[in-house]
Amino acid sequence: MNSHGDSETRRGGGKKHSYPRVSVSLWLFLFSVFSAPSLFSSSQQAPAFSSKIEAVRVDVLATDNGQPIRGLAAADFEILDNGVPQQVDLVSFEQIPLNVILALDMSASVAGERLENLRGAGRALLGGLKKDDQSALVTFSHRVDLGAGLSTDAARVRTALDEAVPAGNTALIDGAYAAITLGEADAGRALLIVFSDGLDTSSWLTAEAVLDAAKRSDAVVYGVSVQSRVKPEFLRDLTSFTGGRLFEVEKTANLGSIFLSVLEEFRQRYLVSYTPRGVAKDGWHKLDVRIKNRRATTKARPGYLAGS
C-alpha cells in the first residue's frame, strides 16, 4: 500500500448504531455483543456507526528500508485532512493494549488439514498476546457465531477455536461486519484478522454496506485468503480502506507465521490522534500521513467517512 493515511474516527458522547435487516444468526450475534434488542432495526439502510466526530485516530506504520522507525513524537508527524494540515495531539507506541479479533471461515471447505492449520495459527497468535491484550473469536459459514467475546482470557478463545466445526457455505461479508461490530463494542485498539478459503456465497449484507461501515470504524483489518481463480476483491478493499494488508496464500501450512507477523507489525504501529480543524464535518475525508524531515514510508488508511 502507498504511504498515505489511514484515519479512524474516535467518537465522543457515545455511539449510535443502526443495522439493516439481517439473518437470524447474525442478529443473534449482534444481540450477544450489545445485549440490547433495541439496537436492531428492520430498515434496509446500510450498516453504519454514526455520531459526532470529536477526534480522529490514525494507526500508522512508519518504516525506513522496511524496518520500523521507533522514537517518533507528535511533532514528527504531518497529517493532511482533505488537504488541510492538522495539529497532532497525541502519539502512542506499544502502550495501549490490543483487542485482537479472529474472524475465521468455518464453511464446509475448511476441514481436515486446512482446519488444523487454521487452529494452529490461532493458537500461535493467542500465545503472542500480552497480559492486558484482549481477544475474541467470530466464525462464519452460512451463519455467523460469536465463539468467544472480548476478554483477557485467551484460553476461552482457544477452547472455542478447538470446538468450532466446519459446515455449510461462506458468509464472508456478514462475518466481517460482525467482527467490525465487535471491535466497535470496546474502546480499545482493534486488530481484525479475517481468514477465508473461498468466495462469499451466502451473506445477507452487501459488500458496499460493510465497506461503508469499515470506513467509520476504529478497526484495522488484515485479511488472509486462499488463492483461487477469482480474486478476493472484498477482502482487498476491506484491508485497504482500514489500513491493513491482504495475504493471498496457495496453502495454509504457513498460517501461523502469517498471523504472528500481523501481530508483530500491528505492535509496531503508532496511534496518532488529532481533532479535525478547517474541514467539513461530514462526508469522505482523504488523509495524507507523512513523517517530517526524514526518509520514511508510512502505511495507514487512505481516509475516513464522517457524519451520519
Image: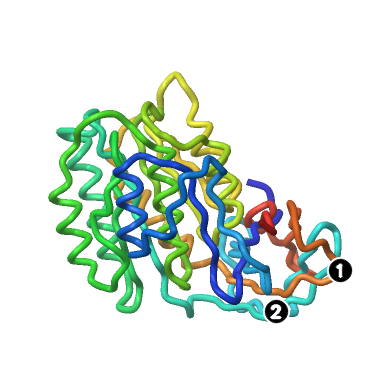
Q: What residue type is labelled 1?
A: Gly
Question: At which x and y percent is residue 251?
Answer: 31, 32
Q: Identity of the amino acid at label 2?
A: Ala
Left or right: where 231 falls relative to 276: left
Q: Which residue is drawn at 67% across and 68% down?
A: 52
Q: Position of residue 14 (x, y in %)?
A: 54, 73
* Distance from Cα at disc 1 to Cα at disc 2: 19 Å
Please name the residue shown 45% across and 54% down the image.
180
Q: In which quarter of the image is the C terminus?
A: bottom right
Disc 1 vs disc 2: which is toward the camera?
1
The residue identified by callout 1 is: 278
Label 1 secondary element:
loop
Give residue 122's position: percent from left, percent from top. 26, 53
The residue lying toward the viewer, choosing from 44 and 5, is: 44
Residue 12 picture location, percent across and down: 60, 75
For disc 2, the marked residue is 74
Q: Residue 21 is drawn in which quadrant?
A: top left
Which comes before the other along the chain, label 1 or label 2?
2
Q: How crowded is mark 1: few (under 14 residues within 10 Å), some or many (20 or more)?
A: few
Q: Residue at x 86, y 64 (%)?
A: 84
Q: Residues within 10 Å of mark 2 (few under 14, many from 20)?
A: some
